[in-house]
Amino acid sequence: MIDQIKTKAKELLKTKKVDIVIGYKKASDRIGAIPAFIDKEGDIDKLIWDGYCVYNLSNYLKDFPGKKIGIVTKGCDAKSMTVLLQENQLKREDIFIIGIECSGIVDEKRKGGDIAYDERCKGCKPATPPIYDVLIKEEEKKQAPRLEQDPYESVRKLETKSIEEKFKFWQDEFSRCIRCYACRQICPLCYCPRCVAEQTQPAWFSKAVSVEGNFSWNVNRAMHLAGRCIDCGECERACPVGIPLRDINKKIEKDVKELFSYEAGVDTEQKPLFSSFDKNDPEDFIK
Amino acid sequence: MKIGVFVCHCGTNIAGTVDVERVSQAASKFPKVKHSASYKYMCSNPGQNLVKDAIKKHKLDRIVIASCSPSLHEKTFRKCVEAAGINPYLIEMANIREHCSWVHKDREKATQKAIELTRLAVSKVSRNKPLEKTYTTIEKKVLIIGGGISGIQAAIDIAFANYPAVIVEREPSIGGRMARFDKTFPTLDCAACILTPKMVTVSQSEHVTMHTYSEIEEVSGFVGNFTVKIRKKARSVDINKCTGCGACYNKCPVKVPSEFDMGLGKRKAIYTPFPQAVPNVPVIDRENCLYFKTKKCGICKKICTVGAIDYDMKDEVIEEKFGAIIVATGFNQFDHSVYGEYGYGKHKDMITGLHFERMVNSSGPTGGKIIRPSDGKEVRDVVFIQCVGSRDEQKGLPYCSRLCCMYTAKHALLLREHNKDSQAYVFYIDIRAAGKNYEEFVKKVQDEYGAIYLRGRVSRIFEKGGKLIVRGADTLSGAQIEIKADLVVLATGLVAQKDAPSLAQMLHIPYDKNNLFTEAHPKLAPVETITSGIFLTGACQSPKDIPDTVATASAASVKALGLMVQDKLAREPLIASVNQDLCSGCLACLKACPFSAIEEDEIEDRKLRRKRTVAKVREAVCTGCGNCTAVCRMAAIDLEGFTNTQIMEEVETL
Ligand SMILES: Cc1cc2nc3c(=O)[nH]c(=O)nc-3n(C[C@H](O)[C@H](O)[C@H](O)COP(=O)(O)OP(=O)(O)OC[C@H]3O[C@@H](n4cnc5c(N)ncnc54)[C@H](O)[C@@H]3O)c2cc1C
Ligand code: SF4
Ligand code: SF4
Ligand code: SF4
């Protein structure tokens, strides 16, 4: 499999189809994987592929304006590219997607172990990227059986709480937020030139680390990803204080799916959720 | 800053529930408020004078009126303060009537709420900016899409007012459906006798230009300034040379079914759809023409004495500017092949109302003889079935097509007139004859023309012994009925044109779930669309008979002429604008804007040192609806009159 990736990367660089290939290489701890930016054929052997290739590489696409890029892309990460294309942030002709039909990545929090699937991989099927230029499949024998898990298990658990309990729960979680904005920086879909969190005229919410400011920030972040978040899980992974950000994202994802039959990242041509209006949209909220 | 607050009693409408005096007193203590007062009717002349006098006396520079909905009197008070020397956009209205006194009972709480609403308006107005109206010119020409009776009438009305009108009709001739009819209900005047003179008037008017065999390709711009691309399909006959002698189609060897005659007759490969066609210039149907298929033949070219035939003619796309557009594209017939009980449209002797119109027409394919298409024999027993497709939510249309009761009655009458021995049977659900002299007409058909009306649905139709056996129930007598019919005529419902959605998208006008174009208001703006400068007439909006069609055509013309007579159009400054530095170029706003008022723009991003795409509002098109501001995550797009700073000021005050 890695050979296929390397062969393709070599071909792309050699034929000058791309200027650079973004993939994964071994981290210095020799276990984890970090992004690799390869622009010389000689460096191609650094490329790896295994269950530790966790990062969503599409976040790096914007760092090479005007360049043609080849990019190694898991199913979930390809979805964020779909949204970026849909939102006019990428040009399709500028990227060559080396799609990986992956069989799941490791749960980072349990580093070192065998392939213990990350939470989100359990509900991910199919793992085929919605867009790609070449598709590389994981070998049969390596494919661990995919569990038929409800992707909204933890959301459903939260939903059973009363409003007061939910409020209390999130208040406790958000009270730990240190406003480092790591969640925003790592998010491939947070690309605003100037985030609302930094605007001053008007100042939309308090910049101070306070329950009120933290709540506003986190709700804003989540709402700005409504109908867009593709659950690559990077925000939750990046959050230094362990706020379960995926639970908020997933809750919105579930609502959006149920209310508007809309799924983010599957079709570059579909109108963004908030830009579309349909006469059959539910209006139960109007009392 | 000196803000003045004026609280209105609205008689007892507000004062009945809200303590107006207390609101006024409370307001006088709000920050920056220099003066407050109340009055019985603020919108009345004395009320307005009170405001004007206070402005002068207290040197007020911003005004809050606490009264009714801005949709009612905002314009009134804008004018009022302008007369007193204040920019008209430096006022705000606090709606303490619809939003307060009318919906509450508790006087204390209502008064509290009125005070809060006024407080918000005061804080909002403190962030208002003086704004100026802008003006655009108006192209003094009206485009009419569709040359049926509605388009023709509209062109006549516009031309009568000495303004130029351009008809774009996609068929080779104008006339629409009406040109196919023999007689028209309820007066039974001959369709050609009343339509042809109008067609001739249009063709001879110096103010009307006709583009037949043409289609709309692209529409851009906005009220007063539409730019339209029109594709003039290659007719293969030079319209300026042709004399309409008809030698070409007399000699053309190719015969194909005539669309105009609903396939009941034949036409040639070079043809005019009907003898009274306007313009009376044939067109070559290139799909069937031998010359185009095999490069042989060429008879028409040889025979034409004026050299009008041009096989090399190409489609031509012209671009014209218009101030207003009238949409008059008419209707189509419901496709009854979804009904199994009627044999999915497979029986030869089962036709639709439009076929019947052609048959009964003395200049039609049968010379006015009503015959069985299968063997050409004259008919005796004819079954008419109403509501085919109409009023059937499951398989057909949810609505009533309005005309089928009437044209079926007309058909039953004409049948007996053409053939004294014939018998009409009409299956119906209800008779809807709600027009002037309509009920009388149906009664006449029943009483004097012996049409047998059977209330009930047809359950099955099948062929036996050369006849069509029609089975159904008469729900009034409870009897099962079987009729051996020579001919079955289906009164198929009226539906939108197939291309209606794509035309609507081109024009940026809405259409409903039945693809019928939607008017701006069903009662109070029935011929307008929400896109200013675009008007509707005729059956493209909803099923309409000729009287209604002509009436809406004249109504739409008046609306278009209302624009034509203006020197320039004032545009409200309450529109959106993009802060391009903040804009990420996601173009969510572009996709959300229902008026296509947002376009892509490119800026040089100094920080990134490269060009990038951003959004830009086309000021002349923006209606200020605010959809875009709601979808912009970056808050990069702002709406004058409802700016982020104004709204935040209100939120902070809460
Ligand atoms: C069987 C039958 C019998 C009827 N009998 C009567 C009667 O006796 N009395 C009565 O009052 N009413 C009668 N009507 C109703 C009558 O037909 C309509 O009221 C009338 O035709 C509506 O006129 P219109 O101009 O709106 O539409 P149409 O007559 O349909 O004309 C629309 C025109 O627009 C053109 N067009 C469509 N789309 C485009 C496009 N995209 N670009 C350019 N051109 C386009 C079409 O080619 C057509 O020429 C009858 C209807 C039917 C079906
Ligand atoms: S990464 Fe975590 S701590 Fe940092 S801003 Fe986001 S939610 Fe707050
Ligand atoms: S929605 Fe906002 S950020 Fe996106 S293009 Fe429009 S103005 Fe720019
Ligand atoms: S305010 Fe409405 S019309 Fe104007 S640009 Fe925004 S969405 Fe379009």
Image (cartoon, coloured by chain):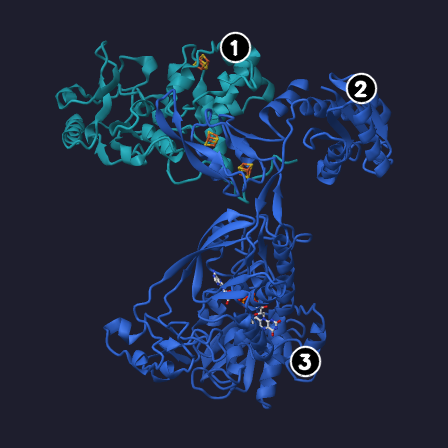
Q: Are marks 3 and 2 on the same chain?
A: yes
Q: Which residue is mark 1?
A: A175
State which quarter of the image contains the C terminus of chain A.
Answer: top right
Q: Taking the image as four quarters, which one is ligand 2 found in?
A: top left
Please identify the quarter of the rendering in which residue B103 is found.
Answer: top right
Residue B527 visible? The answer is no
Position of residue B405 relative to residue B553, above or below, is below
Question: Label 1 is placed on what type of residue?
Answer: Ser
Q: How many callouts does the rendering have? A: 3
Query: Is B516 situated left or right of B88 in this image?
Result: left
Q: Are marks 1 and 3 on the same chain?
A: no
Q: Which residue is mark 2?
A: B28
Foreground residue, A201 or B396? A201
**Circle 3 SS class:** helix
Residue B623 x/y as whole percent: 58, 40
Residue B321 x/y as whole percent: 49, 53
* Mark 1: C-beta under 8 Å from nearest atom of ligand 2: no
Chain given the colour blue: B
Q: Crowding at label 1, few (<14), some or many (≥20) Cα neighbours within 10 Å?
A: some
Query: Is B358 situated left or right of B404 in this image?
Result: left
First in sequence: mark 3 or mark 2? Answer: 2
